[in-house]
Image: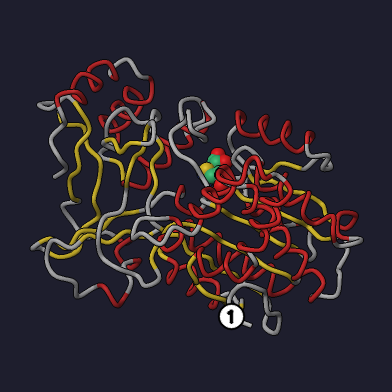
């Protein structure tokens, strides 16, 4: 399985022999057998020395991909107003933990920090907690927040550390393009039944290649019930880590108050189909080529996240599209206000806002979904008209 390498890729595979992660994973496979797709993805993104996020800042025009907060300041500002509105509805709890998962360059928080100044008392109540594994991005976040005049945040490696222990209490957790970076398992319905897909080393090809487990594995119970009868050849992606993190956070906000807000590209109903993709320099590349050098993501199964949150006692809102959500939060009015204050930048400002809600099938407006989890009885803005 897997597409044969492009001649150009072949050259890079050869050059990649020297790339540390290719050698490390190749040796690991030789010793302990083919890796699950999730193990491969986790190593490619998060290996402590050679992982993609460990070694670089991937964002921006010169990087490999661009995200909503990097496109327009309006994104972080509107999310800030969403937080402020929720804080008021919840009766202004203080202190309020504001946790961001995978904050990238810290741009969203910097824009949010500016926007929440309009609500007296909120800045004073907020304690910033960032969940970030990349040392490069932690440094970028520190610099960005300092420039924005925000208080120094506390960094954590894991979600549990940002919510547990003495930190117990009301929290808002924000995650933009975080869940798509969490490792997925892939299962294929072979003639013999569902099998987990694995990454092996193909000596003949001189590169990594996909294969299937010869036997059924325990992980198969994760294939959603509704998909088990899918036709032969179907591939299903499952992200148990995303589901367990969502459950943990939902349990936290159900018990302590406020919300989780997840924004990502993904689908509303669990579905068959491969979405695992690698991006380098804004162009798709083979995810099996030169791990650690490209971003690898998979679309987010919002139905699975919603199920996990509901089972943990959370009240789920959405998913709705990013276009509908930002529209309801006042994207048009905020864009107009920015244009009025900087007429010289009118064109860029309007184009950036339009990009956030681009209705094309692969555009941010509809491919991106927004899901919130609150305790029962708390209604966040942005999910219903009016
Ligand atoms: N939210 C930012 C960045 C998105 S890129 C934005 O919208 O611009 C994904 C982010 O998640 C990066 O900051 C990356 O370092 C972080 N990340 C990826 N996997 C992670 C993990 N398992 N634990 C913590 N952070 C992770």
Percent across and percent down for residue 200 are: 22, 37
Q: Is mark 1 within 8 Å of ligand 1?
A: no
Q: Where in the figure is residue 328, as x and y percent of width and height? A: 60, 71
Which residue is labeled 1 in the image? 384
Which quadrant is home to the C terminus? bottom right
Q: Residues within 10 Å of mark 1 (few under 14, many from 20)?
A: few
Q: Write down the quadrant of residue 234 in the picture.
A: bottom left
Instruction: Identify which residue is drawn at 35% across, 70% down.
Output: 270
**Is 43 above or below relative to 74?**
above
Point out the image quarter for the N terminus: top left
> Who's the residue at 78% across and 57% down the image?
97
Instruction: Name the residue at 85% across, 75% down.
Output: 91
Ligand 1 found in image quarter? top right
Q: Quick one: 279 or 249, which is closer to the camera?
A: 279
Q: Residue at x 56, y 68 (%)?
A: 325
Q: Is residue 138 left or right of residue 150?
A: left
């Amino acid at each position: 399985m897997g597409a044969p390498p492009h001649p150009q890729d072949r050259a890079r595979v050869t050059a990649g022999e020297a790339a540390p992660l290719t050698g490390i994973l190749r040796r690991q496979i030789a010793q302990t057998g083919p890796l699950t797709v999730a193990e491969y993805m986790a190593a490619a993104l998060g290996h402590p020395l050679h992982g993609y996020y460990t070694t670089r800042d991937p964002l921006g025009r010169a990087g490999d991909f661009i995200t909503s907060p990097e496109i327009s300041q309006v994104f972080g500002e509107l999310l800030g107003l969403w937080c402020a509105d929720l804080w008021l509805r919840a009766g202004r709890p203080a202190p309020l933990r504001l946790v961001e998962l995978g904050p990238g360059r810290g741009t969203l928080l910097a824009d949010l920090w500016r926007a929440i100044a309009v609500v007296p008392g909120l800045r004073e109540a907020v304690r910033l907690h960032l969940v970030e594994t990349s040392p490069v991005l932690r440094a970028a976040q520190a610099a960005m927040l300092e420039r924005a005049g925000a208080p120094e945040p506390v960094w954590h490696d894991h979600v549990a550390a940002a919510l547990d222990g003495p930190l117990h209490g009301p929290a808002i957790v924000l995650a933009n393009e975080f869940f798509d970076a969490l490792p997925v398992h892939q299962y294929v319905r072979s003639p013999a039944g569902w099998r987990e897909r694995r990454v092996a080393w193909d000596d003949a090809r001189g590169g990594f290649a996909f294969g299937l487990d010869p036997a059924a594995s325990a992980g198969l119970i994760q294939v959603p019930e509704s998909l088990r009868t899918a036709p032969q050849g179907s591939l299903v992606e499952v992200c148990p880590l995303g589901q367990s993190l969502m459950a943990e956070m939902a349990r936290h906000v159900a018990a302590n108050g406020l919300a989780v807000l997840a924004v990502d590209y993904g689908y509303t109903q669990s579905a068959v189909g491969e979405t695992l993709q690698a991006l380098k320099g804004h162009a798709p590349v083979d995810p099996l080529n030169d791990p650690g050098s490209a971003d690898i993501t998979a679309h987010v199964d919002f139905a699975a996240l919603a199920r996990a949150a509901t089972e943990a006692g959370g009240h789920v809102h959405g998913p709705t599209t990013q276009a509908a959500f930002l529209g309801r939060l006042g994207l048009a009015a905020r864009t107009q206000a920015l244009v009025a204050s900087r007429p010289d930048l009118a064109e860029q400002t309007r184009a950036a806002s339009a990009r956030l809600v681009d209705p094309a099938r692969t555009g941010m407006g509809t491919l991106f979904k927004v899901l919130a989890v609150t305790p029962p009885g708390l209604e966040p803005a942005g999910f219903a008209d009016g």
